[in-house]
Image (cartoon, rainbow, N blue to C red):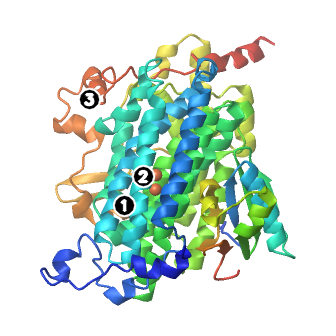
Amino acid sequence: MSGDAVARNNAVGPVLRAGEVADAVVEALEEDNPGKEFTVEDRVAYVRAETEGECVVRAETVARVLGRPFKIAELEVNLSSFSGRIETTDDTMRFYFEKRL
Amino acid sequence: MLERSEWYDIARDTNWTPSYVSQEALFPPEMGDPYGIPTEEWETFDEPYKVSYREYVNIQREKDSAAYSVKAALARSKFHDEADEGWACVLKLHYGAVALTEYQACQFQARMSRFGPSPAMRNMSVYGMLDELRHTQLQLFFPHELVHRDRQYDWAHEAQHSKNWAVLGGRHAMDDIMMTRDAITSSVMVSFAFETALTNLQMIGLSTDAANLGDHTFANLITSIQSDEARHAQLGTPTIEIMIRNGRKKEAQQAMDIALWRVWRLFSITVGIPMDYYIPLEQRHMSFKEFMHEWVINQWERQVQDLGLERPWYWDIFLLDIDNHHHCQQGGIWSWRPTVWWNPPGAVGPKEREWLEEKYPGWNESYGSYWDVITNNLLQGHEEKTHPQCIPIICNMCQIPISHRPGPEWGARAYQREYGERRYNFCTEVCRWIFDTDPERYKDHETIVDRMYSGEIDPPTLENVLKYMGIGVISEGGRDGHDYGWVEGFRAQAAE
Ligand SMILES: [Fe+2]
Ligand SMILES: [Fe+2]
Ligand SMILES: [Zn+2]
């Protein structure tokens, strides 16, 4: 790594505590963000899912994958961190950057 | 029931025009906003991570019951009977450094919840305050059951009340950024620099290693804590955006730069040393440097740019420090092991050194040369020679012994400042710069070594100094956690 190392990426997405919710969110991300390529890194205790620039998690999709009711606020229980910035609505969480590099 | 978005804006709008007291008396600038940014501007504060009180209570209950039930389920396991002392060191260091720091964070959040100029900020920091109280309680309760097996775990509760040298550094930094600043400046310093950039290291960095080792209680605990941080750390971004929009970019930048460095110096010890030395080789999932690059260089620095701030002016020094500081301090802390409350293993046997060389090219000819001397002394049965006979020079800002990379790249130099009656020593240009931003603020604090000369520790005999630091009082001090077992690999090599 050079002394000039600096982030030249637009990677955004959640870092989730490993478990069924993490798996469901990864599946939902792929479904709700068509055409986007996700990299998923499994680090035993946590999972990092990332894509370029922007992605959205919808409670409805996570609920369907899980096979039980799921409110977006519940995602917080498993959302240990995230890359990018966050925006929350009544039923979605969005990760994004304002500026693209 | 109404959706949150249908009532949220009205519910959080709790500003009114005071008639019994002046606005200034209600929100004194030195506690809230010293920058004079208009109230209407603060009213645009829109927290990106929203939660209602009802949601908050439900979610936190779920988090807590999971953390406590994992602990209860594993309470009878033999994990701690069989765990490596290196891992026990990680826990002792973590709890001592973190538990009551969380309580300071609780007070910092409380200050925002009372004096924050934006009603949305006051609302969100109420949750932040409750979060930090939860973190304090969890991290006092979890180690408590370990005290009966090893008194060193008692530092979870005692460390912050002690004058141990390692605690002085932590307290100096936290007092600086969390306890003695107005709500706005400390929001930049803590919410954005500390919580967004660095808490991930402590709370996520150690979780994979914990899970690999089988300490699921701890892995579960710290990632649960971090899920609160991910939310309340978001108090920093709207604060910074409003400051920039109102001509206060310079002040936001300086606050961020000061805080990142201050907390980094601590975390390179509390996370860097564990990840690269204390955790048994087989269970290490990443080097500290790799982790820093993923989480701070790639993840956080990118957010800095997105917000419209610059990376800190000392970025190159920071990158060098990522390669070096924790290696220096592993050597230092191990050498002065009787002064700490955990049993640091040297943990630089042949295999570990191979790993270190691979992760940090040049480690062997630099840090390795320091450990060569120690290893030879131990192999020859001269344990007494591994205890230094001199006192280190301590940085007047970070309170950490001044150190440099040994070996061919030796670049040690003094960073000094004459101010008022005395001379101050600093580890780096950065710590000196922080002093220069406000010398009056910092000038009266004495390092542990200053205290040996000023009469605070009188007489400054080894015995008195240790006692002053809580050693032999709260618990015994440290010894090599592996009873020097790590040198045996070299004896075997020599025999071959
Ligand atoms: Fe916390
Ligand atoms: Fe926090
Ligand atoms: Zn320093």
Counting from the top left corner in percent of width and height, residue B10 is at: 42, 82
Helix, strand or loop under label 2: helix
Asked if both marks, 3 and 1, belong to the same chain, the answer given is: yes
Counting from the top left corner in percent of width and height, residue B412 is at: 48, 48
User: What type is the residue that disc 1 sits on?
Assistant: Gln
Which label sits in the foreground, 3 or 2? 2
Identify the residue position indicated by label 2 in the image: B132
Instruction: Mark 3 or mark 2: name the one nearer the start of the chain.
Output: 2
Q: Residue at x 15, y 84 (%)?
A: B19
Asked if both marks, 2 and 1, belong to the same chain, the answer given is: yes
Q: From what the image shows, is residue B73 above or below residue A17?
A: above
Q: Residue at x 31, y 27 (%)?
A: B470
Q: Gap between marks 2 and 1, in whole Å? A: 8 Å
The answer to whether the residues at label 2 and label 1 have Cβ atoms under 8 Å apart is yes
Identify the residue position indicated by label 3 in the image: B468
Identify the residue position indicated by label 1 in the image: B109
Instruction: Mark 2 or mark 1: name the one nearer the start of the chain.
Output: 1
On the rendered image, what quadrant is the N terminus of chain B found in?
Answer: bottom right
Label 1 within 8 A of ligand 2 by Cβ: yes
Instruction: Mark 3 or mark 1: name the one nearer the start of the chain.
Output: 1
